[in-house]
Image (tube, rainbow, N blue to C red):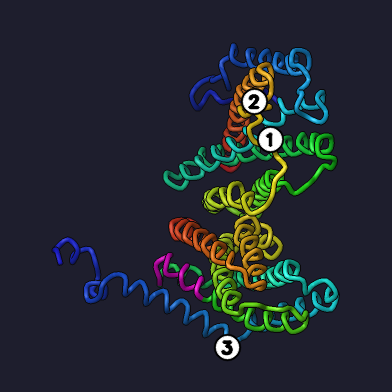
């Protein structure tokens, strides 16, 4: 297979400027090294050495939520303007959100096993991330089952918006009705993590969002190429 | 009435206010569905049989523990939820299968269709509950402190479930493999109302006043999801 021909659209655009791509690799490497070598063991946790996983767990959860909000924003944009690229972006962002949700859940389960003694406890945040995962899974099941790209885009965008509306209930209302294990005030309260932790955690968050943006642009470019190839085939 | 308005509307809507025509369309959709249902009794028969069977199955296997408040509340809502999932998608799936959807799109505005179907589904859910809840209470030997609050939470819970389930029914009607997909895509939308209804039913059966807070939470859910559904329905329904 030759080079994908995108010159017809708007010339050769890089997915992200090359220095930014190299910078991303260096930044993530730095975060990983710092998490294992520079950060001291966290005193407040049951297993101070294992607590380093927080540096990767929290950004994954955050990116999962950001990806979901971006996906909903593009779904609304699709319903308002009906451009196929908004639908592609919405679906791509939801796909990445699912990936980061799985990563956050797995890292969380590993840490829960160490910290609380069992991998799954129906803690409110565990419940809400599971619901987030089910919403994503249902979204993709719905997309896969609707024939015709226009109807698929319209109906899955509607589902996306409705599910986003229900999420606050799962994240804010249900935890209040049940008890919880997740700590609050880990970042600011007394007994908070050390300064090194907070610095590395902030850097990891920036790195993960950066990584998400890069992956999203690759996915969107891929979808554009596939759509272009599909059009060429059908002509 | 201004000239612009007169020019832009037909004879019927100038004679009566727009909302009356809208309400008449919604009522006509409901009456049409009710008449179809009473002629064939497909959904009603199958759904009620499903509800009764699952109530009997649950009480047959779980009588020993099932009469305790929290367990009974969760079980009764599971029976209601899955009975609803077996029948509520019917309103839109039938239009799709009999190819009557395009005609309905021409005959009534989208939101009138939505509200008519919602009213039909709500009636179907209440019919399910009229049968299953007394049967469940009798078979399990539950003690109910306050029937009034149990009925309130059942009505509000059904309203919440049917608002979400009617919207997802419209979505799933356009998809393949609808039966399995319907429960899967409705679950994330309905889980808040299901969880709150279980807590509320438990409180109502114990005679606690906490039921008021649960009723309020369901009311907020209904307000939010109904508004969003009315805004989104035209996108789901259009061809």
Labels 2 and 3 share a subunit: no
Residue A50, above or below B147:
above
Circle number at residue B62? none
Where residue A79 appears, as percent x and y from the top left, is 46, 48
Q: Main secondary structure of the magenta part?
A: helix
Residue B128, above or below A171:
below
Circle number at residue B39? 3
Circle number at residue A208? 2
Q: Residues within 10 Å of mark 2 (few under 14, many from 20)?
A: many
Q: Quadrant of the N terminus of chain B?
A: bottom left
State if disc 2 and disc 1 touch (CB < 8 Å): yes
State if disc 3 and disc 2 touch (CB < 8 Å): no
Q: Total marks drawn?
A: 3
Extreme residue toward the bottom, this view: B39
Give the residue drawn at x 63%, y 73%.
B207
Distance between mark 2 and mark 3 Cα atoms: 59 Å
Using the rendered view, name the quadrant where residue A68 is placed.
top right
Q: Nearer the viewer, residue B156 or A131?
A: B156
Give the residue drawn at x 65%, y 46%.
A132
Where residue B82 appears, as percent x and y from the top left, is 70, 69
Q: Is residue A110 left or right of residue B204?
A: right
In front: label 2 or label 3 = 2
Instruction: Please tell me whether mark 1 sits on a helix, a strand or a loop.
Output: helix
Q: What's the chain of the residue with tag 3?
A: B
Distance between mark 1 and mark 3 Cα atoms: 51 Å
Q: Which stretch is magenta?
A: B108-119
């Amino acid at each position: 297979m030759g080079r994908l021909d995108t010159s017809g659209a708007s010339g050769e655009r890089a997915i992200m400027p090359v220095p930014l791509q190299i910078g991303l690799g260096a930044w993530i490497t730095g975060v990983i090294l710092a998490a294992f070598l520079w950060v001291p063991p966290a005193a407040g946790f049951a297993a101070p050495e294992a607590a380093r996983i927080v540096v990767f767990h929290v950004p994954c959860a955050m990116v999962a939520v950001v990806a979901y909000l971006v996906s909903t924003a593009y779904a609304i944009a699709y319903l308002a303007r009906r451009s196929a690229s908004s639908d592609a972006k919405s679906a791509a962002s939801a796909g990445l959100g699912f990936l980061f949700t799985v990563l956050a859940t797995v890292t969380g389960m590993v840490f829960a096993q160490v910290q609380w003694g069992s991998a799954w406890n129906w803690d409110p945040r565990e419940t809400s991330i599971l619901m987030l995962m089910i919403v994503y899974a249902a979204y993709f099941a719905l997309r896969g089952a609707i024939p015709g790209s226009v109807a698929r885009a319209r109906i899955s965008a509607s589902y996306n918006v409705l599910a986003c509306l229900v999420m606050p209930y799962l994240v804010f209302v249900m935890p209040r009705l049940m008890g919880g294990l997740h700590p609050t005030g880990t970042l600011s309260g007394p007994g908070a993590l050390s300064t090194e932790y907070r610095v590395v955690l902030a850097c990891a968050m920036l790195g993960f969002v950066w990584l998400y943006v890069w992956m999203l642009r690759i996915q969107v470019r891929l979808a554009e190429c596939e759509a272009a190839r599909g059009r060429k085939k059908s002509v | 009435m201004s000239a612009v308005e007169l020019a832009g509307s037909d004879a019927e809507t100038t004679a009566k206010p727009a909302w009356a025509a809208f309400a008449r369309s919604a009522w006509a959709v409901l009456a049409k569905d009710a008449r179809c249902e009473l002629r064939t009794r497909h959904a009603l028969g199958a759904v009620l049989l499903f509800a009764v069977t699952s109530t009997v199955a649950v009480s047959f296997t779980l009588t020993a523990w099932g009469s305790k408040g929290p367990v009974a509340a969760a079980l009764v809502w599971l029976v209601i939820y899955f009975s609803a999932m077996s029948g509520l998608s019917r309103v839109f799936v039938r239009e799709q299968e009999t190819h009557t959807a395009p005609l309905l799109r021409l005959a009534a505005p989208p939101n009138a269709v939505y509200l008519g179907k919602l009213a039909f589904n709500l009636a179907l859910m209440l019919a399910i509950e009229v049968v299953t809840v007394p049967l469940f209470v009798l078979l399990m030997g539950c003690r109910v402190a306050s029937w009034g609050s149990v009925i309130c939470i059942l009505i509000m819970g059904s309203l919440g479930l049917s608002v979400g389930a009617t919207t997802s029914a419209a979505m799933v009607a356009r998809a393949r493999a609808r039966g399995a997909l319907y429960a899967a895509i409705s679950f994330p939308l309905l889980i808040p109302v299901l969880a709150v209804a279980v807590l509320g039913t438990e409180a109502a059966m114990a005679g606690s006043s906490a039921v008021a807070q649960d009723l309020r939470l369901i009311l907020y859910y209904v307000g939010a999801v109904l508004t969003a559904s009315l805004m989104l329905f035209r996108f789901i329904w259009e061809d």
